[in-house]
Amino acid sequence: MLWGEKGKDLHAGSKNFMAFGGGVRLCVGADIAKLLMASFLHYLITKYRWTVTKGGDIIRKPGLVFPNGLHIKISEK
Ligand code: HEM
């Protein structure tokens, strides 16, 4: 079993944190925030080269976990 800070199980989703809130009160900017993040990632992936410098071991169970981090160097293509 993989444990994170303060013994929290890294394989489970957080039950205490919901990025855009939930229930009766929801973030009204959630959709524009997701659009901006998708656009940011698109340019980061298509216009820049990523080189892994340290870490990068991946565990898929059920989400992605990087037990020793993922250190990358980003340079312009
Ligand atoms: C990654 C970006 C963002 C995150 C993680 C985020 C997260 C949150 C959270 C957790 C809440 C509180 C929900 C609650 O009270 O339970 C909230 C509320 C709110 N957010 Fe965002 N937000 C983001 C971006 C934005 C953007 C871009 C806008 C505006 C363009 C925005 C406008 C608002 C407004 C107006 C509320 C208050 C809604 C209400 O009380 O009814 N947010 N947001």
Image (cartoon, rainbow, N blue to C red):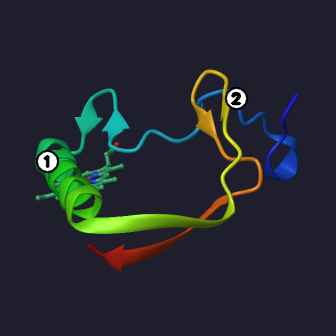
The quadrant the C terminus occupies is bottom left
Residue 54 lies, in percent from the top left, at: 69, 66
At a point 87% along the width and 42% down the height, the residue shown is 7
Residue furthest top as drawn: 62
Mark 2 close to ligand 1, CB under 8 Å:
no
Residue 11 lies, in percent from the top left, at: 70, 29
**Near-viewer residue (3 or 46):** 46
Say few, some or many: other residues with alpha carbon within 10 Å of mark 2 (under 14 / 14 to 19 / 20 or more).
some
Say few, some or many: other residues with alpha carbon within 10 Å of mark 1 (under 14 / 14 to 19 / 20 or more).
few
**Near-viewer residue (25 or 43):** 43
**SS for dot 1:** helix
At a point 50% along the width and 66% down the height, the residue shown is 51
The quadrant the N terminus occupies is top right
Q: Is residue 44 above or below residue 5?
A: below
Residue furthest bottom as drawn: 75
Give the residue type that dot 2 points to. Answer: His
Give the residue type that dot 1 points to. Answer: Leu
Name which quarter of the figure residue 13 lies in.
top right
Q: Is residue 14 above or below residue 76?
A: above
Determine whether, in the image, residue 62 is placed left or right of residue 21.
right
Determine whether, in the image, residue 17 is placed left or right of residue 10.
left
Q: Which residue is mark 1?
A: 35
Residue 4 lies, in percent from the top left, at: 80, 46
Determine whether, in the image, residue 36 is placed left or right of residue 44.
left
Q: Which mark is residue 15?
A: none
Q: Which mark is residue 11?
A: 2
Q: Is residue 38 above or below residue 40?
A: above
Q: Are marks 1 and 2 in contact (CB under 8 Å)?
A: no
